[in-house]
Image (spheres, rainbow, N blue to C red):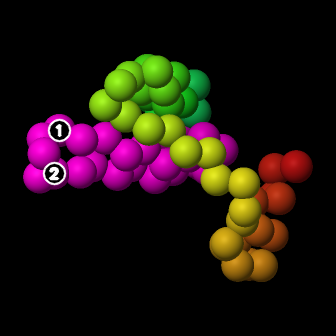
Amino acid sequence: MYWYLTFSSAVFSFIMIGHTGQCDLPDPRKSGFAPYIELFRDKHYAKVCELTVNFRGELATDADSINE
């Protein structure tokens, strides 16, 4: 899962949270989420945080395994 924290001004923050493995599009290759991760990764005004601890529940974790 990735978090984005960007600043568009001194008084405004924008946070985008998502997971590249979760996509509802009929063709997941058309998702722009993963390219945005790379686009903003090296920008001075953005921070990409990779979360390493899963705080989701057991039901959500089991649902993720359906395509494994």
In the rendering, at what x and y percent does residue 13 appear? Answer: 23, 51
Q: Is residue 50 depicted above or below 57 in this figure?
A: above
User: Badge 1: few (under 14), some or many (20 or more) residues near its Cα, within 10 Å?
Assistant: few
Question: Residue at 12% across / 41% down in the picture?
Answer: 9
Residue drawn at (81%, 50%) of the image: 67
Between residue 26 and residue 61, name the one nearer to us: 61
Residue 21, percent across and down?
66, 44
- How much space separates mark 2 and mark 1, taking CA atoms? 6 Å
Residue 48: x and y in percent read: 50, 38
Q: Is residue 41 left or right of residue 58?
A: left
Answer above or below: position of 14 versus 65.
above
Residue type marked 2: Phe
User: Residue at the location (43% across, 44% down)?
Assistant: 4
Is 14 placed left or right of 5 in the picture? left
The magenta segment is 1-26
Q: How many marks?
A: 2
Q: Does residue 31 appear anywhere in the picture?
A: no
Q: Which mark is residue 8?
A: 1
Q: Is residue 57 above or below residue 28?
A: below
Q: Please, what secondary structure does the residue beneath circle 1 have? A: strand
Label 2–label 1 contact, CB within 8 A = yes
Residue shown at the point (67%, 72%) measured from the top left? 55
**Foreground pick, 62 / 53:** 53
Q: Residues within 10 Å of mark 2 (few under 14, many from 20)?
A: few
User: Which residue position is annotated with label 2?
Assistant: 12
Asked whether residue 4 appears in the rendered view, the answer is yes
The amino acid on which the numbered mark 1 sits, given as a three-letter code, is Ser
Q: Quadrant of residue 7?
A: top left
49 or 21, which is in the foreground?
A: 49
Residue 34 image position (x, y, % from top left)? 54, 30
